[in-house]
Amino acid sequence: MPIIGYSITNVSANRKPVNQIDKLDINSSVKITNVEEKTITFPDKSEALGIRFEFNTTYKPELAKLEINGEVLFTDKSNKKTLELWKKKKALPENVDIEVKNFLFRRCLTIGINLTQELQLPPPVIFPMIAPKEENKSNYIG
């Protein structure tokens, strides 16, 4: 896996007082804000990419917002091509973009779940629910 580490540099969560909400939309998104070369020294000295990000979860109507900023350390054999594409188009190759964003959704939504518990908000992801087994009300045997 080319993601070798990550760090969180800022976490912000706020909630506004609201009396009653009929419908609540919760949306999460991740934005890559910068890519730069990094030298890592553990376990061996090598080159990596520092991919900075902003992760946001918004609750609409304007009830709450969660923001997480940080950096992912990424390395593979296409580091130079990835950096060149970023410098030219402010975009990552599709395979790198998907891997980094999926990683960030898993990590940041986990942090978001803990924050929303403290703010008494619905979680940013829907948890599976166990329902009682329905009895077969039909007497038909076929």
Image (tube, rainbow, N blue to C red):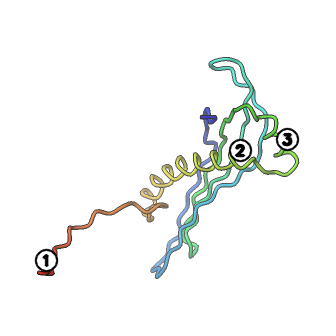
Mark before the other along the chain sequence, 1 or 2: 2
| Residue at the top extreme of this rendering | 44
Which residue is drawn at the image coordinates 50% and 54% (left, top)? 112
Q: Amino acid at mark 3?
A: Glu
- Residue 74 in picture, x, y percent from top left: 68, 36
Which residue is drawn at the image coordinates 15% and 81% (left, top)? 138
Mark 3 secondary-structure assignment:
helix
**Label pair 1/3, CB-CB below 8 angstroms:** no
**Label pair 1/2, CB-CB below 8 angstroms:** no
Picture quadrant of residue 66: bottom right
In the picture of the structure, the residue carrying the numbered disc 1 is 141
In the picture of the structure, the residue carrying the numbered disc 3 is 84
Q: Nearer the viewer, residue 91 or 40?
A: 91
Q: Amino acid at mark 1?
A: Ile
Name the mark on residue 52: 2
Looking at the image, is mark 1 or mark 3 nearer the viewer? 1
| Residue at the right extreme of this rendering | 88
- Residue 51 in picture, x, y percent from top left: 71, 42
Picture quadrant of residue 117: bottom left
Q: Is residue 126 left or right of residue 26?
A: left
Q: Residues within 10 Å of mark 1 (few under 14, many from 20)?
A: few
Q: Is residue 94 left or right of residue 12?
A: right
Mark 1 secondary-structure assignment:
loop
Mark before the other along the chain sequence, 1 or 3: 3
Distance between mark 1 and mark 2 Cα atoms: 61 Å
Mark 2 secondary-structure assignment:
strand
Q: Residues within 10 Å of mark 2 (few under 14, many from 20)?
A: many
Q: Nearer the viewer, residue 115 or 76?
A: 76
